[in-house]
Image: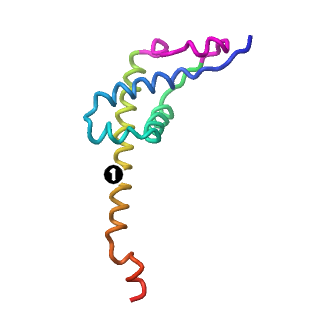
Amino acid sequence: MAQTIVNLAVPLVTEKIEEILNAYPCHPHQQTFTSPNLRQKLTAYVLSRMPTLYLAVDAMEAYAVRSPSSCYTAAQHSQIDRLIHQGIEHILQQSETWTEHRCAEQSDPNLTPSHWFG
């Protein structure tokens, strides 16, 4: 039978992100992270900062691996939770900085074409 490699961290991190975001206040956290792109950035933020476990299984069994939370220790679960919280704050801060920068550009009268030529 064909073997396939399964990343055990992705389903766990995705599940934990859902749980944590559901517990956060509605605004701005839940509203900001309704965007699939920002959720993916959050997932990538966490995955790039944690140890990842892989499992080689038969191709048919790969879909049966749902939530491999038992593969991680309690300390690793705490670390993942901390990384999710840090990632949320990091992404919100980036989003806020980008919005402030964008608003400043739009509100500066010297940047409009009518002012460029006198």
Q: Residue at x 37, y 49 (%)?
A: 95
Q: Position of residue 46 (x, y in %)?
A: 45, 33
Q: Is residue 72 above or below residue 47?
A: above
Left or right side of 88 for 8: right
Provide residue 61's location: percent of width, then percent of height: 62, 11
Which residue is found at the position 33% from the left and 76% from the top? 109
Looking at the rendering, the stretch of residues picked out in magenta corresponds to: 55-73
- The residue nearer to you, when weighing 80 against 64, is 64
Name the residue at the bottom extreme: 118
Image colouring: rainbow
Q: Is residue 56 magenta?
A: yes
What residue did someone put label 1 on?
96
- What is the crowding at mark 1: few (fewer than 14 residues within 10 Å), some, or many (at least 20)? few
Q: Can you say whether 19 is above or below 72 in the image?
A: below
Residue lying at 33% horizontally and 65% vertically, measured from the top left:
104
Q: Position of residue 3 (x, y in %)?
A: 70, 15
The quarter of the picture where the C terminus appears is bottom left
- Number of marks drawn: 1
Residue 31: in magenta span: no
Q: Residue 35 in the image: x percent, y percent?
A: 42, 40
Quarter-wise, where is residue 39 in the image? top left
- Image quarter (top left, top right, bottom left or bottom right) of the N terminus: top right
Question: Dot 1 lies on which element?
Answer: helix
Amino acid at circle 1: Glu
Residue 69 appears left or right of 95: right
Q: Note whether 9 is above or below 44 in the view shown.
A: above
